[in-house]
Image (spheres, helix red, strand yellow):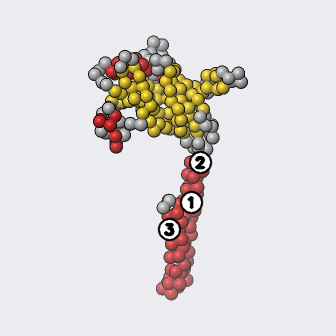
Amino acid sequence: MRQSQRYWIVLLLGVGVFLISIPLVFLEFGQTGLEALSIVATTLLTLGLVILYWQQHRVLRYQQLPQLEISEFNMLGNFEFLQVDISNVGGGPATSMALRIDIYELSGEGPLQTTHGRLRRIESLGDGSEKKTRSSSIRPSEINISFEAESKGVLGSGARIQNQDSLASIVAKEFQKDRDVLYGKVLIEYNDKFSQEKTFEADFSLKFTRHDKLEYEVFDFQPWADDNQQPALGG
């Protein structure tokens, strides 16, 4: 049962108890009792209206929040370009979006490394080509909008630094520590219209392996999840 339904049930019960108590209070205390009961009822009614207003405010606020979904994720070249298709099925815009990838071990230990940086929106041009813009926002009801981040721009604390390690070199260095597989947690950081910082976590992971070269695949297993702390599942 939803919270709003419980609220109305409690309210109706309160009204019923109040109506039943009127003749009882009058018989016991007379007019003075009724006046006291009236003061109590007015106070409770005011409190109920305040609670109702607060609940409506919460509902309206929720309806203006973005709700993100990731429909596609790809890394091109030597993990140089990271492309992600994002949909906003909520009622408000997501702005200042940034991509974050946390690197974890198969056991769930981590994050070993955290990568972070701005996403840039890809716009389709009339001639069939695409242009990378400076925008990092998505409006309500926009579906499968492509964004891109460059590997060197993703790594670090958000500011682009020359001679930064690429994502490929970060993963390669972790593999030098006798690891056979690594996992990446994909997160989108953004601001909502109320200037609150939020984080959306993808429902998939990036599985990194190393054979003749570094490889990755989009994978269901998430070793950092409490119900996935079984290393054999991700081998």
Which of the two labelled residues, at mark 2 and mark 3, occupies the earlier sequence position? 3
Q: On the picture, is 31 further left or further right than 173?
A: right
**Residue at the image position 44 percent from the left and 31 percent from the top:** 218
Does residue 82 lie above or below 27 as drawn? above
Element carrying mark 1: helix
Q: Which residue is mark 2?
A: 63
Which of the two labelled residues, at mark 1 and mark 3, occupies the earlier sequence position? 3
Q: Name the front one of labels 2 and 3.
A: 2
Q: Which residue is mark 1?
A: 52
- Residue 142 location (% of width, % of height): 63, 37
Q: Nearer the viewer, residue 45 or 151?
A: 151
Which of the two labelled residues, at mark 1 and mark 2, occupies the earlier sequence position? 1
Q: Nearer the viewer, residue 235 or 99?
A: 235
* Residue type of the residue flagged with mark 1: Leu
Q: On the picture, is 43 further left or further right than 128?
A: left
Q: CA distance from mark 1 to mark 3?
A: 12 Å
Q: Which residue is mark 3?
A: 10
Q: Residues within 10 Å of mark 1 (few under 14, many from 20)?
A: some
